[in-house]
Every structure is written in C-alpha cells, then in structure tokens.
Image: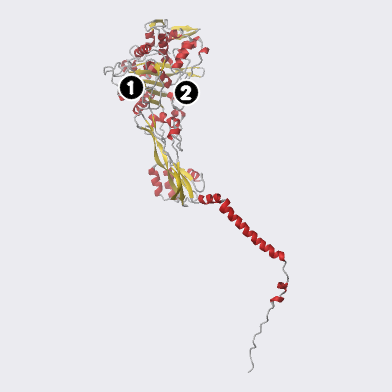
Amino acid sequence: MKKLFAPATTRGVNYATSPLLASKTPNWRSRFVVALVAFSFVGLLGRAAYVQVIGHEFFQKQGEKRYAHTLEVPASRGRILDRHGLLLATSVPSPSVWAIPKDFDASQAQRRKLLPLLGMDAKEFDARLASGSQNFAWIKRQVDAETWGQIKTLGIKGLYETREYKRRYPEGESAAHVVGFTNIEDQGQEGIELAFQADLKGHRGSREVVKDRLGRVVEDIGQGVESANGRDVQLAIDSKVQFFAYQRVRDAVAEHRAKAGSVVVLDVQTGEILALANYPSYDPGQRQRLSGEQLRNRALTDVFEPGSTMKPFIAAWAMETGRVRPDTMLNTAPGSLVVTGVPIRDAHPHGSLTVFESIQKSSNIGAARLAMQMQPRELWELFSSVGYGQKPQIDFPGTVTGRLRPYKSWRPIEQATMSYGYGLSASLLQMARAYTVFANDGEVIPVSMLRQEQHQPGLRVISKETAREVRRMLQAAAGPGGTGPLAQTIGYSVGGKSGTAHKQEGKGYASNKYRSWFVGMAPIDKPRIIVAVMLDEPSNGVYYGGAVAAPVFSQVVQQTLRMLGVPPDLDVKPQVVAKALPAVQESF
C-alpha cells in the first residue's frame, strides 16, 4: 500500500553557527553591567545605613508623627477668695469644640441645627473651619456642657470636643474691678487676675499618647508630666461689705444722675481694704461690648483735686507745731481774703472763727490763714508723709501717683489754695489712706489688698493728742452745724469731712461740673473703719459732698460695722433726721 503521509523531518539549528551569537561581545560591556549592579547594591546599603543609623532619629520622629502625639494637660487656675474664704473667682471644666476639616462632613439639616447652637452664621462657621490646618481647627471654645451635649447628638463626622477650664465670677459686677478677668487662654488681663498671674496660673503638664486617624486616644506611651494647679489668693475684701458698698454707690449714681461713683472701705486696725467698689461696672464673665468707662477702676486710676478734705491736715499741723490751739481765733471776715491779688472766698461769710469752727464750717479763709503761717517745705513734707504724691504700695495694677509739685516752685497763692485742696491731686484710695493718720492716733499705715493677720506698723506724723483733737473736729463737721450732717448713722458716732470741687477742663475749671466726696471714720473714739465716697458729676440739682456723698457714707458705715460685729457706741436712734435737713454747702 502506498504511504499517504510521509514522516515530517525537522531541520536542526546549529546555535554555534548563529551569526549573532558567533559575534564576539566586548568585555567592557559585561564589566559595566556588573559594576552598575554592584554600585546599585552599594547605594542601597548606604541608604539603609543612613536610615537605620545616621538619620535614625529623624525618620523615627516622622513615623511617630503619624500616630504619636503630645497632649497638654491643663492646670486649674488658682481661686481668688475673700477674707472669709468665699469664692470671688474660680475655674470650672468647660467643653471646647474643634474639628478635623478634611474629615468634616455635615448635611444641610445638620448644619441648620448646629449653627444656632454655636451662636454663629454659616459664613463665620466656614471661616473657623478654614482657619486651622487640615487636621485641626478651633470651632468654638468654652461652650456650656449642655450645648456640647446637643451638638454631640447631631452625630456630625469630624467634629470633636476637648476639655478646658473656664473662669467663673460668683460676685459678678460688684467685685469686677477687684478680681478683674482672664482671656480665652486663661491669662490675667485686669485686677487681681493680672496682678497675681504668676501665682494663679499654675503649670501645665503633658502626656504622650497614640491616636487613631479620627483623633481618638488609643493608649498612653512614655512618662507624662504632672500638671501643677495654681495657688489660691486670699484677699482682704469682705464680699458682703463689697456688695453692699457697690449697691449704695450704684443707687447714688442713679439718684443724682452722676457720671460715676466709687467707695473705698479700710480696716483701721490692719490697713486691709474691705471694699473697693465702682460704678459703672461690668460682669467679668460676660465681656462683650465693654467700654473703657466700665473697665476703669476709678478708685485707683482717677485722680482729682481733693478739695476741703485737705483742711483737717492743715489744722492738725498748725496745732502739732504749736502755732494754734483748737480755740485760737481766726479772722475770716468779710468772707474773702486776697493773696497776691487773687481773692479766696468762703461760701458764706463767718466773721471770726476758732480753728475748731473753721474745720466744722469748712472755711477756705481759715485754712488759708493757717497755711500761710507755714513754710512751703513743711506743707510738702506733711502731704508727702500721709501719701499724697506717692504711689500706693499695693499689689494691684493701675494705681496712680497723683500730683504734688516740688515745694520750691510753689507761689504764695498756690500754697494758700492747697490748704483747701486745689493745686494737688490724688485718688480716692490715697485720700482714704491719708485719713488713717487721724483714725490711727497719728500714724499713717500701709494698705493691703491681701488678708493681713495683724496690725501693720505705721509712720508717725502727728501726736496722739493732735489726732484725737482732729477727730473731735471731724465729728463736729459731720454733725449738726457742720457741712456733713447727713453722714450721721444709727448707733455709731462718726466723723469726717465733705468736699466739693469744680472739675478741671483744659487749663481751667468747668463752671457746672463737680466732683463730690466724703471721707470719714467710725466709731469716733476708737475708729475701726474709714470710708471714702466719691460721685463724679452729680447733675440732679444737688452736688455738694455733704448732700450726695455723705448719705452713702452713712449707709456703708452702719452696715459694715454691724457685719464686723462692732458694738454700737451710741443709743440706737437716729442722730439726725436726714430728710429734715437742708442741703449744706461747703466752701470750694
């Protein structure tokens, strides 16, 4: 049978005779390839050595940044307490809202509910969201716990909460100018909060943690640093006395349509400031739309000519130096005295007055005649020794020096006018402290905003006998026939001096703008407190210090002495029926 298919034959290929493989390859090419591979390995080894040995710390830190974080552990700011341990300022935990902008995702319905809770509109919210990095942005700090609870229920992705401390001020407006306030970073800005910032702030701690991509803490790593809470500061302020003084000056400002008012209460035994109240005031916890008028601590920062409150110092020094006695007669007729061509007048002509009566009636001429018997240096040293022209040495920001020019530049008319309080200036606190020389038997004592456990040593200026004689004069000035009978109070003897002065405007004085004040002490035989009251620009038709400031003095004295447990030294009945008294005028 004929074979239909022949077996296939395969042609063999002789690779040895291939012209491509038979061509001879240069040696340098193979060596170059081997060298290239070798250098690559060396580079990789070098890079590995750099990453693992030389740049180890850098790369480790870069890695840790992806998961490890240092969290600040805030310290609780120290408390501010009154003399009895009652809270004037304290810190409470408060939620703060923040976001991871790259993860933030909220529906329109969620945004509509969120914005009212944050108290902002869409534009402000978007600006806050864009204000930080892609991983962190503050939305609103120190919200209420209830507010955060409502925000949390919305379930918005990328919105979180952290805990901070928020400052609370239980006494509100009444103690605002004393305690001051802090900013959002818990840094003191005014008052005691600023003065004792270093003590109150404490020291923040830290902790090393691992976080996941949502910012949640997974675990603690390493050793943390413990936070140290701030130190408490206890003041001399009595919160009850402070509140009552604030109420009385607030009411007086409203009644007399005054621009402002201040009250200072000093403890004569220790020099402690029991109250320092100003109106207008503000709430330290709600500081939106504040003005400088509200923030000014007028009792410390405002200076003015002290007017007739200077007359007792002139009489005291005249008696101390043996120039006069309380019953020495002074000629004040015919109601005016010309000094180097400038007339000095009394509000009412008195004829001849004793030294005692010149203080009781507040005679400008009587004070000027006494002052003109003295050398300018004597008066300057007297005023300086009781604190005029000297900055009060208290731990408080904003205290002022006032003005007391060098005596060598005084003209005769200036020496005369300084005797009744024109030509020098002082704050209400300086005036209150100066009167400690009479209340403390001739020694002027330092004052303090902090609690003092014992009597502070003073500087003797006049003798005990002279100081007691001046207290008798002040008692008469605050009684029937004096310029401040409305200062009388129920159950306690009082003494003090009213004052009224035209306000300075430019180089002159305003004809219809006044400052009115009363400075005095009680009980008169053994004073426990000094109270100084000032009203700025009373404009309700009455402006004399004896009519507008003395009633505030009376109310504050009576309430304060009762709070301090001082027993009455008079029969418990009114010494003067206030409404039956006419407005008493004192000389300017």
Nearest to the observer: residue 140 or residue 511: 140
Q: What mark, if any, has residue 400 been given in the picture?
A: 2
Q: Is residue 122 above or below residue 336?
A: below
Instruction: Identify the residue shown where x is 57% and y is 50%.
Output: 55
Image x and y of residue 109, in percent: 43, 50
Nearest to the observer: residue 228 or residue 312: 228
Residue 258 lies left or right of residue 341; in this view the side is left
Image x and y of residue 6, in percent: 65, 88
Q: Quadrant of residue 81?
A: top left
Q: Is residue 454 above or below residue 94?
A: above
In the displayed image of the protein, which residue is found farthest to the bottom?
Answer: 1
- Which numbered disc, 2 or 1, marks the residue that appears first in the sequence? 2
Q: Which residue is mark 1?
A: 555
What separation in Å lies between label 2 and label 1 (alpha carbons)? 28 Å
Depth check, mark 2 against mark 1: the one in front is 2
SS category of the residue bearing label 1: helix
What amino acid type is highlighted by mark number 2?
Answer: Val
Q: Quadrant of residue 462?
A: top left
Nearest to the observer: residue 417 or residue 276: 276
Q: Quadrant of residue 373?
A: top left
SS category of the residue bearing label 2: loop
What amino acid type is highlighted by mark number 1?
Answer: Gln
Q: Is residue 117 above or below residue 255?
A: below
Regarding residue 435, the answer to whether it shows in the image is no
